Image: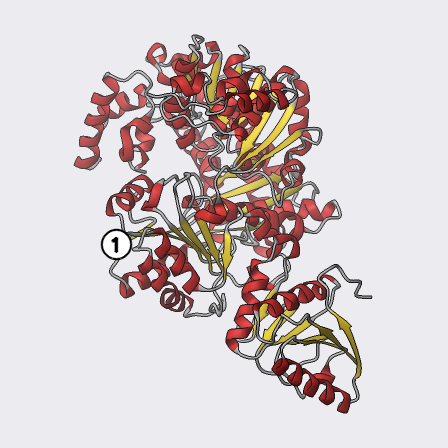
Amino acid sequence: MNAKFYIMSGSVSADSSELDEAACQIISRHYRNGEKVFVLANSQQHAERIDEILWRFDTAQFVPHSLSGENPQQASPVEIAWQPVNARRQTLINLASSAPNTATYYQQIIDFVPGDEAGKKQARDRYRLYRQMGIQLETLTYNDEFEDLS
Amino acid sequence: MPVSSTPNSTSFESSQQESQSSLKASAAYFESKGTLAQRIDGFAPRSQQQDMASAVEQCIESQATLLVEAGTGTGKTFAYLLPALLSGKKVVISTGSKALQDQLFQKDLPTVQAAIDYAMPVALLKGRSNYLCIERVNSFAHRSGGQSPQVLAELVKIKAWSAGNRSGDISELGPIAERADIFPLITSTNDNCLGRECANYDDCYLVKARSRAMEAQLVVVNHHLFMADMVVKESGFGELIPEAEVYLFDEAHQLPDIAIQYFGQSLSSRQILDLCNDVELAYRTELYDMAQLAKAAKKLSLSVRDFRVAFEGERDRGDLRPLFKRPKFAQQLPSIREDMGFLQSVLKLALSRCELGDSCYERLCKFISLFDKIVQVNASGNSYWYETTRIHFTLHLTPLNVSERFDQELEQRKAAWIFTSATLAVNGGFEHFQNQLGLASATTLLLDSPFDYAQQSMFCVPRYLPQLRDPKIDQKLADMLLPVIEANQGRCFFLCTSHSMTQKMAAVLREKSNFTILVQGEAAKGELLESFIEDGNAILVATSSFWEGVDVRGQALSCVIIDKLPFSAPDDPMLVAKSEDCKMRGGDPFAQVYLPEAAIALKQGVGRLIRDHTDRGVVIVCDPRMVHRDYGELFVASLPPMKRTRDLQQLIKFIHESD
């Protein structure tokens, strides 16, 4: 179990469309890497914003996904929810302000350190919580260039 | 009419120079100051059209094979007509639908002919059942007892119409010609046509249409007739369509399925029972000393009727292989075969005694060899299936793949072959079409629509759709979508993938809204479309036949709703055949047959929306699999580049911006 925190540039605050866009780029990369991804958003509205960004992506970057409540007969490679769920998946992409207590269900966690002070503080709380759960932590600077996931 | 001017003549010249390497002579006709712009009212030059005309011209010169997908609005009809006419060669143009065939011959062809002063003879040729049969109409007048007064009145009208008509094409009669009670009375079939023996042979509309076609430099036919001709030519018994140097197929995406039908064979209970009747007639008229004949015919007709009973259900179709393993079929098959064999041996004794008897013997021999072929259901390379109506059954043998045979045909005729449609490619590739018809060495050309889809249209798969198997799906969809339909003030096609959904949706929409609801089946297609346009705020609920070939320009249609991704039913015999073939070649039927066919069907359905530069509109697909499943990518990539959303509010906003 490990968690990766992407440090965003100063202008990208928590709950901003820039952060959502960056998160969707990362979701797309992990989907293309063949991973099953669970995305945790702050609220239903937030989850729907993520859904909208993914759906409007270029076809070359198509990401099959579902919102919690849509209950597809066959689970989508990417699920977006606003409540933690008791289901194991390979990758958690956390966009919620607090860390889910289900964080240990995932092989890897992707999280973000926004540029604004309030956002930074919440990120520090999440970082601490993950560490208490015994998750290995790593931070890196976000860039939107292609990044090798291996 | 003012000719549109080019503001900067130098840029015009330079662009011409740049593209000289690929553009051919016919492209010049499509320039903004070219012949077509000068001679055709409202002609708008489009670079896609020039590219296509050049490619067609090149193909004709080099007797090659060309596949062109030309998106809506490229003007593909002119783009192939012009180089075909300019070539001076003998041309056959084939369309998928009779509607396009008529439009081409009555509208587009005369326009281009006039624009370039084309003086060679052109002709329109349809299948036999499209022409009035003078003999049948006359003979009906002599024995009209038992018909309803209404039918008699219609027949008087038809006779009056035929007196002043040159073509005898019954489509000119309008809806009367489609009526099941009238249609067989006024047209002939292969079986009941008297041929050269007919007293009206010299006036026969079909004979005249065929001879006009034989003499014409350009003939417009349809895919059914083209394939029928190919099969007739193969059998060596004459031809319906003249040999040409250029073959052009419009709506070519429909050709593979039609080709499979014609290369297949079938035998129906109706054919056998008709034969039994004729045998009995021969016994009662000329072969009266052979009571065995009547008995043998009676026995065969009884076992054929029993066989129909063995198929359960009213109207059905399915695979013959598992069926023939059941005990009751295993018993009845040999008994039908035996009865046919017995009748054959009795008829043989009567050979050369009367014409009817001889023709019955020949027909029966054909039926027997066909029957023997179809019941060998374990032979590979074919699909074996049946279809039943209330009283009849038909046994079918369908080849799994016709590409080799079709390819052979191309090889044999030294000609140019051009296949075009608005929907030929899947996700930018032509493999799906090529796999079905061969054509491996063809040149391909993909021309995008000149429309600005991102500005003109918005595409939505709504969030939280009801499950596809939800029993209340019709009500839930109506509640979810009526706000959008209301914002759009009707002007909506609701296209369903099944008849039952069509009925359910129509009922629910009638209950929950005040719009005029037009439903397929409640009137003829043409009438429904007219009412739709006339009403101006209607919702038309329909299935497959409205997915293709419907052209409603402008804002009269600005919302298309599709209930489900149009995957074919897994019991569709044609699909079963194609899947089997795909498996035999080591492929994946879902990825290589079901998905591409559904993508093409969806593209056709969505294509109803934007028919012009000024059209604006929204598309809603109520199938969450398009977002949830990885194959959604293929569907999205096959559609025009519309703006996408999952939010119905965004859609309503877009609609209000259009007002």
- Residue B519 appears left or right of A71: left
Quarter occupied by residue B512: bottom left
What residue is at 45 percent from the left and 42 percent from the top? Answer: B548
Q: Which image quadrant: the N terminus of chain B?
A: top left
Mark 1: secondary structure: loop
Q: In this figure, what is the number of numbered marks?
A: 1
Quarter occupied by residue B294: top left
Q: Residues within 10 Å of mark 1 (few under 14, many from 20)?
A: some
**Residue A106 in picture, x, y percent from top left:** 73, 79
Residue at label 1? B516
**Residue B114 in picture, x, y percent from top left:** 39, 14
- Residue B402 appears left or right of B554: right
**In this view of the protein, which residue sits in the foreground, A67 or B395?**
A67
- Residue B4 appears left or right of B318: left
Q: Is residue B326 visible?
A: no
Q: Is residue A145 visible?
A: yes
**Residue B207 in picture, x, y percent from top left:** 40, 15
Residue B321 against residue A79 in the figure, above or below: above
Quarter occupied by residue B247: top right
Residue B509 against residue B449 in the figure, above or below: below
Residue A120 against residue B70 in the figure, above or below: below
> Which residue is situated farthest in the bottom direction here?
A132
Q: Amino acid at mark 1?
A: Thr
What residue is at 66 percent from the left and 72 percent from the top? Answer: A10
**In this view of the protein, which residue sits in the foreground, B297 or B391?**
B391
**Residue B90 in picture, x, y percent from top left:** 53, 13
Residue B141 against residue B452 in the figure, above or below: above
Colouring scheme applied when the structure was drawn: secondary structure
Chain name for mark 1: B
